[in-house]
Image: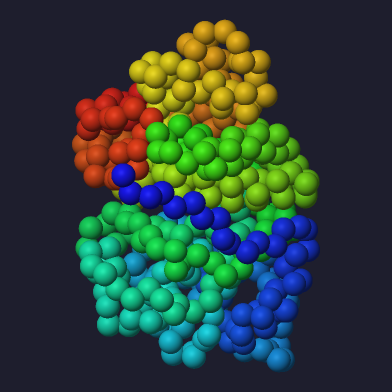
Amino acid sequence: MSAIQFSFPTPTLYGAGSLAELPARLARLNVRRPLVVTDPGLVKTAAFTALAKTLGVDGQGRDWFLYSGVHPNPVESDVVESAALLRSSGCDGVIAIGGGSPLDAGKAARLLAKHPNFPLAKFYEQPADWTGLLPFIAIPTTAGTGSEVGRSSVITLDATHRKAVLFHPELLAKLVILDAELTAGLPPGLTAATGADALTHCIESYTCPAFHPMCDGIALEGISLVVDALPRAFKNGGDLDARGRMLVAAAMGAVAFQKDLGAVHSLAHPLSTLCGMHHGLANALCLVAVMKWNAVRKPGLYRRVGIACGLDVVTGSDADADRKTIEFIAKFLADLGLNKKLRDVGVPLDKLDALTAQAWEDPCHRTNAIPVTADDLRALYLECL
């Protein structure tokens, strides 16, 4: 048996108003000419305005450049274009601000900036020199993916039109800023969907059978934070305490899933690539069906998840603990408006074969709590449709 590595190294600033510390932190990292990577929608928000003001909108004392073309589910061209601007502008670091998509694109852009003649797809197929990447600063404006603390980047490749995962410790950010003020303007629907993403990360990583007790503890506490904070943030976007706790919960979910994930994510990834669905929404619409499927085959799997949710499931049968926990999660999602069927959000039945094929090729189900077959994944899609 090979050794298992435990690692939690990302420097993180937490607190409302912590963005103000960015200039001093950039100086410590010797970043004087950063490229800001984001998406078209975010440049219109107060969060981007705050960042621009912090960097200096008139350029005094610091030059900075902007790439704002990242797609909702990042594609290869996002990485190619931002890397080209990174090189042509002589930038010495990357600041990614937004949801998981800009953060993932910003991470990967540094690879192509270093290896401009190396096609992105090759990083998945053969070794490359990952050292010496430009410093990366991550500023999330949603509380969901946790990409800010992750060592991976999920990009849809041109050749396959499928999501692929770049994974290497060198992708980790040199600084993460969790500033609740930057998430206060997130609409309720996106607050719910991104929060459901964080919840799914915590539940799936906890129930993944890999041995990683540190991740297990983080996942369970992340569930507790989401259960407390997400309904408050959904109802009142200006609740900075709730917003801050959700940022931490999202980061904890991503730290926890270095342990790996499960079948929910294998179902969700094709819904994004083939149907354009928001990743958090896709997770939310598949989560309960997978939990039910798992619980039948491994009774008691969700007892500690239920305890983390604040339920009285310490005693009683395994089946009863699972039932109460799954019913709680189903109602929790319904109260956030996330109790729809896939057909309600435009997923047609004729996509079933293509969705199943991609889900089966997705690696996440390999660490599901219970092994699944392609037929199982198809049946789960039908349950969600």
> Is residue 307 something one can see in this rendering?
yes
In the rendered picture of this protein, how many numbered marks are placed on residues?
A: 0
Direction from residue 191 to residue 38 in the image, left or right = left
4 and 305: which is toward the camera: 4
Residue 224 lies, in percent from the top left, at: 65, 34
Quadrant occupied by the C terminus = top left
**Residue 235 at what x, y percent from top left?**
72, 38
Whole-percent x, y for residue 127 in the image: 26, 69
Q: Tell me where residue 60 sits by quadrant.
A: bottom right
- The location of residue 166, given as percent across then percent down, is 36, 61
Q: Residue furthest top?
A: 316
The N terminus: image quadrant: top left
Q: Residue at x 38, y 16 (%)?
A: 296
- Res. 351 image quadrant: top left
- Horizontal side of 118 relative to 85 (left or right) equals left
Pick whichever, 77 or 212, lies toward us: 212
Left/right of residue 200 with respect to residue 115 in the rendered view = right
Vertical side of 296 occupied by 106: above or below = below
Residue found 68% across the figure and 76% down from its top:
25
